[in-house]
Amino acid sequence: MKKGGFLIVFSFVVLIGNCQSSFEITINRPLYDYSHSSIEVNNIYYTMGILRDSNDNANGTIVKYDNESNLFIKEIIKNDSSTALNFGIEKTNNNILVFGWMQDTSLLFYLYVCELTADLEIVMEKYHYIIPDDYDYIAIYDMVINEDNHVVFAGHFDDYGGSSSNCFVLVELDSEGNLINYNYEENVFYDGEQSADLVLKNDGTGYYYFGGGSYKWVEFNNNLEYINGGFFFDPSHHIGYHISAKYLSNGNLMFAGMTSSDSSLYDLHIPIGKT
């Protein structure tokens, strides 16, 4: 497989009083690497993603850095497995809990959880196999923290054939990385999408999931059970990416994302709807 250059850029804006400062750190390697998300803990930043070795094996990676250009890279290297890191949170003991996937030599995919100290020393690892029959792997696209201080992920199960055997999945873990619950919806209409946003309902009764590529929304209760779904943009619009949904002070939801209509003109849509 031909490998092209790939550039990872971390850019942050920091507000201090009435002043604003920003900094940028760039990692440039000739491999297919990527970053997925970042968190800030006590003015230290952690970015989760993947670095690949010379054999194209994926190693889940967390990058620690600050605005003084101090940088430390921790790769989770396993001789018999590939890993990826998607999200992370700070624990009450000041450790970092990160989440992603792990694939073993039998090509089985697991939900991967790892706890690290602030110095990125591994304290604990957990693996949860939740993939049902007829599916091969799991992808994680977004997360929220619910009112029980549990982590809830949205993503999908898929198969290697790339057929219609796709489905939406929600997974709930506690703050120690233990599996609490998961559920999946076997309906291509509600297939998980990478450019999406998972939102905790403001009344605490469940979740909304907004697909950026399809303009489809799905509503789930706190047991991760499907309630309702539909389109939040007119179906004639398509090719939307990186949707963002936020609650306004009046309780309505605002969405922002790029769309293109049948005229192939791209635009920015910001609809506001009642929940």
Image (cartoon, grey):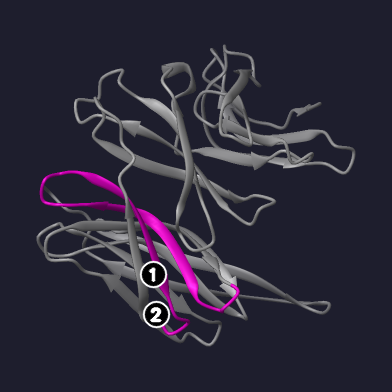
Q: Is residue 261 in view?
A: yes
Q: Residue 76 at x, y = what percent?
A: 27, 69
* Residue beneath the point at 45% across and 59% down: 177
73 shown above or below 3: below
| Residue identified by numbered label 2 | 120
Looking at the rendering, in which quadrant would you find the C terminus? Answer: top right
Quadrant housing residue 198:
top right
- Of all residues, the one furthest to the right in this rendering is 250
Quick check: 12 left or right of 136? right
| Amino acid type at image mark 1 | Ile
The residue positioned 20% from the left and 31% from the top of the image is: 160
Is 106 drawn above or below residue 73 in the view shown? Answer: above
Q: CA distance from mark 1 to mark 2?
A: 8 Å
Q: Local crowd at mark 1 within 10 Å, few (<14), some, or many (≥20)?
A: many
* Place of residue 122 in the rendered image (x, y in percent of width and height, measured from the top left): 35, 76
Q: Which residue is mark 1?
A: 62
Say the numbered circle drawn on residue 232: none
- Magenta range: 92-120
**Callout 1–callout 2 Cβ contact below 8 Å:** yes
